[in-house]
Image: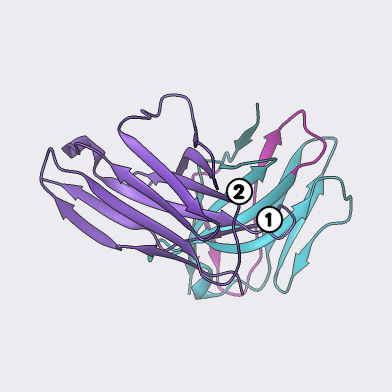
């Protein structure tokens, strides 16, 4: 069985500042993939970043980066230089043969 | 690349009728597709895994006879909500996986309202 936990129901950040969203996971699988998806009000799921759990190197995509702590099973998302368009629901997900999600974090960006 | 089309985007049906939702991978072949259900302000709950040419695998607690899934080709999976009732009203989202490394691409979702 696999579980994904997001402990922050809501977060807020000032425009241009940095925010970190937390996520922990639990699985017995070694071949495991981790994802962050963004869901804006349109409800379209948009891939933000992904990480292979067998790689220690942290993934980075422009202003988005992860802090992957394998021993702690932690996969946090850092958003730098936050923009108004970053405001959305963010879901952390983990996958072996199927992708399951945490409960989500609603991010507000204050101008 | 990796576009998934889901249709319809919205549907209203009468209680007791059935409704079909289609999920198509437009530019890649998807041997595996997934169906999720999302209630307002909640997360996506995986309902079932759809495998091309074989029976779907349902998550615990999901009624197989209520939510019929067919994956007849490498680019199309359908979810049929049978004998719909108001409690089936929800947002349904499909996802297709090209390969595990590439990730999962999602459709735009279907808002089902049963009246």
Q: Position of residue A86 (x, y in %)?
A: 53, 69
Q: Position of residue A54 (x, y in %)?
A: 86, 45
Q: Secondary structure at mark 2?
A: strand
Colouring mode (rainbow / by chain / secondary structure / one colour):
by chain
In this rendering, position of residue A56 left or right of residue B63: right
Q: Earlier in the sequence, mark 2 or mark 1?
A: 1
Q: Chain of mark 2?
A: A
Chain that is coloured purple in the picture: B
Are the residues under marks 2 and 1 on the same chain?
A: yes
Q: Chain of mark 1?
A: A
What residue sits 51% from the left and 47% below the top? B34
Above or below, B40 against B68 in this view is below
Above or below, B33 against B108 in this view is above
- Give the quarter of the figure containing the N terminus of chain B: bottom right
Chain that is coloured cyan in the picture: A
**Dot 1, crowdedness within 10 Å: few (<14), some or many (≥20)?**
many
Q: Is residue B109 magenta?
A: no
Kindly check if marks 2 and 1 are in contact, taking CB atoms under 8 A apart as contact: yes
| Res. A69 image quadrant | top right
What residue sits 71% from the left and 57% below the top? A50
Q: Is residue A21 magenta?
A: yes
Q: Which residue is mark 2?
A: A92
Q: Is residue B16 visible?
A: yes
Between circles 2 and 1, the one closer to the viewer is 2
Q: Secondary structure at mark 1?
A: strand
Mark-to-mark CA distance, 2 and 1 = 9 Å
Looking at the image, which is closer to me, B3 or A3?
Answer: B3
**Dot 2, crowdedness within 10 Å: few (<14), some or many (≥20)?**
many
Give the label on residue A105, or none. Answer: none
Report the span colored magenta: A8-32
Q: Which residue is mark 1?
A: A77
Q: Position of residue B83 (x, y in %)?
A: 19, 36
């Amino acid at each position: 069985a696999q579980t994904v936990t997001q402990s922050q129901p809501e977060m807020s950040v000032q425009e241009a500042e940095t925010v970190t969203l937390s996520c922990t996971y639990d699985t017995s699988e070694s071949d495991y993939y981790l994802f962050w998806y963004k869901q804006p009000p349109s409800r379209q799921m948009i891939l933000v970043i992904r990480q292979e759990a067998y790689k220690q190197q942290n993934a980075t995509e422009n202003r988005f980066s992860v802090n992957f702590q394998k021993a702690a099973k932690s996969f946090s998302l850092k958003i730098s230089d936050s923009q108004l368009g970053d405001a959305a629901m963010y879901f952390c997900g983990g996958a072996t043969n199927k992708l399951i999600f945490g409960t989500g974090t609603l991010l507000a960006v204050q101008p | 690349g990796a576009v998934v089309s889901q249709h319809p985007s919205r549907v209203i049906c009468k209680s007791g009728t059935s409704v079909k939702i289609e999920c198509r991978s437009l530019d890649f072949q998807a041997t595996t597709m997934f169906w999720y259900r999302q209630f307002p302000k909640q997360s996506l709950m995986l309902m079932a895994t759809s495998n091309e040419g074989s029976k779907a695998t349902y998550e615990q607690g999901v009624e197989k006879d209520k939510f019929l899934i067919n994956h007849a080709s490498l680019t199309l999976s359908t979810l049929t909500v049978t004998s719909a009732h108001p409690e089936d009203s929800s947002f349904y989202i499909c996802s297709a996986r090209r390969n595990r490394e590439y990730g999962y691409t999602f459709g735009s979702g279907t808002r089902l309202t049963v009246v």
